[in-house]
Amino acid sequence: MTRHRAVGEIRVQETSVPDTVRLGGTLLVPWPVRGQGPGGSRLAALTARLGADRRLVRLLAHLRRRYGPGPLRLAVPGRRLVLPLLREDVRRLLADSSGRFTPAIDARAKVPPRLQAHGVPAPAGEDRQRRRRADETVLDTYQVVHRLAGPFMVRIYQEAAALLGGERSAGRELTWREFSAAFGCLGRRLVLGDSAREDRMLTELLARTATGRRRRGGRERIAAEVCRRRLRGYVERAEADSLVGELSRLPEGMPGDPVSQVSRWLAGFEATALVSYRTLALLAAHPGHLARVRGELSVLPGTALAGPVAVPYLRACVLEAARLWPVARTVLRQSRGETVWHGRTVPAGSVFVIVVPFFNRDREALAHADRFAPEVWLDGRAVPDEAVVPFGGGAGRCAGENLALLAATTFLAALLRRHEPLPIRSPRLGEGRPVPYGLDHFATRLTLVAAPTPNR
C-alpha cells in the first residue's frame, strides 16, 4: 500500500517498507569505484554476476510506474532520503544556482557511506568552497585543453608506448591489471611529478586506506599515516609541470589540506583508467565504431599528439562508456529549505539521491539506452539532456572532467594509432547486442594487433 507522510496540509509520498527494503538491497550493493585494491577482482565479478545495476534500474522504473512522478521519500527511520524519478526533477536539482540544493551534505543527514560517491572525503571542517576554487584553478576546469597539456600529452604517449612494449607484429595481450598499472604510472606523473612514476606502493596504500571501510585496525591506521607522509613529501617538493606544482603556486591557505586534495586527484585518475579500459573493450566489440575512430586518427599528421579536440569521436566514445557504466552510482543534493515538487512538499534538510544508472539507461526517455551510441554526444541528443551525468552535474560537476578526457583520449589514441583491439574475453559484449549493465573489467581480456599504417 502507498504511504504518505503529512507535512503541514500537504502530503509527501513515501515508499512502502517492502519497496524500501528492495531498494536498499540493490542500491547499497558494494560498488567497485576505483577498480583496484584488495578484493577488487572479487567485488567486480560479484557486482557483474548479480546484475546489480540492471536490477536497480528496473526497480526504479517499477517505482515510477507505481507511485507516479515523485519524488519519493524513502521509509528509512531517522533519515530524510528522497528519490527523484523524473528527468526534469534531476535537471532542477543540478541546474540550481540559488544555493537551495547543495552538494555539501551535513552530518545530520546520516547518508549511508555507500551512497557517497567520492572515495576520498574532505577533512572535517575544511572549507568546501575554498577547496572547490583550488580544484578549479589547478585542474583548469573551464578550459577544454589544460594549460599543461603539452608536457602532459608527452607523458601520456610515453606511458602508452611503455604499455605496448614496442611490439607491433605478433599482438599484445592486454588485461585490466596491466592497463591500470600503466595508467597508475601516468596518474602519479601528472599529479605528483616524474619522480613518483615508480611509486607503486603509494597507489597500493591509497587503495588500502580508501574510505568505505567502517572498521580500521592498527595496520590500516599505519598504512594511512605512511600514505600521508609519502604524499606530503611530493607536495613539499612540488615538481614543475605537475598538478602539485600548480597547487604550490596558489595563494597561501587556498588549497586547504593539500594531501587530501592530491589524494582525490589520484583517485580521479584511477576512475579515468577504468572508463578508458571499458572504452577499449567497447571498441573491440563494435568494429564499425572502431573503424570510425581509426579513420579519425588517420587524418592526423604523423607526429601530432591526439587530444580530445583533435579526436571528437573518440572523446564521444569515452563519454558513452561513462554513460553506460558510470563510475559514480549516485549524485547527492541536500535542500537548504522546504521545496515543492508536483504539489507535494519536501522538508528542509532532505537529501535527494539521484541514481545515475537509472537516468543513463532510462528506456522510456532514451532510444539508445542500452546501445553503444557515441554519436549522441556529437549530434546534440546527449548534451542538452542534463539528466545524463557521466561526470556529475551542476555545482558538484567533476572539476577534473576536461583533464580526465584529455588523459583518456590521448592514451587511447596512442594505443589505437597503430593497433586494433580484439576481444579475447569480453563477457556479453558484442555488435548488435544490448550493452550489459555491468562489466567485470578484471575478466575482460583484449589483444592489440598491428593495424595498417594510417594514411597521411
Image: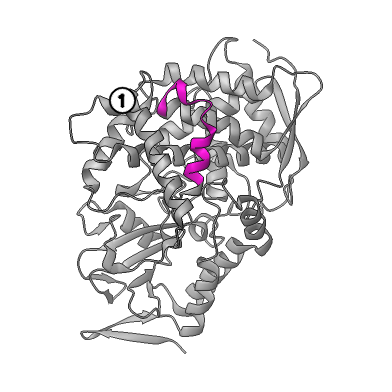
Q: Is 434 one of the magenta-colored residues?
A: no
Dividing the picture into quarters, in which one does residue 30 lie? bottom right
Residue placed under numbered mark 1 in the picture = 246
Against 31, residue 24 (above or below) is below
Dividing the picture into quarters, in which one does residue 446 lie? top right
Against 34, residue 106 (above or below) is below
Against 90, residue 199 (above or below) is above
Please tell me how crowded label 1 is: few (under 14), some (14-19), or many (20+) other residues with Cα within 10 Å.
some
Q: Which residue is most to the left? A: 252
Magenta residues span: 192-207
Residue 295: in sight, yes or no? no
Q: Residue at x 48, y 56 (%)?
A: 329
Q: Is 197 one of the magenta-colored residues?
A: yes
Query: In the rendering, at what x and y percent does residue 263 appear?
Result: 40, 40
Q: Nearer the viewer, residue 279 or 218?
A: 218
Dividing the picture into quarters, in which one does residue 275 lie? top right
Please tell me whether the stretch drawn in magenta is mainly helix, strand or loop.
helix
Per the image, label 1 sits on a secondary structure element best described as helix
Query: In the rendering, at what x and y percent does residue 37 appear?
Result: 56, 47
Task: Identify the amino acid type marked 1.
Answer: Glu
Q: Residue at x 38, y 43 (%)?
A: 398
Where the C terminus falls, by quadrant?
top right
Q: Nearer the viewer, residue 405 or 184?
A: 184
Identify the coloring: one colour
Query: In the rendering, at what x and y percent does residue 125 appear?
Result: 22, 52
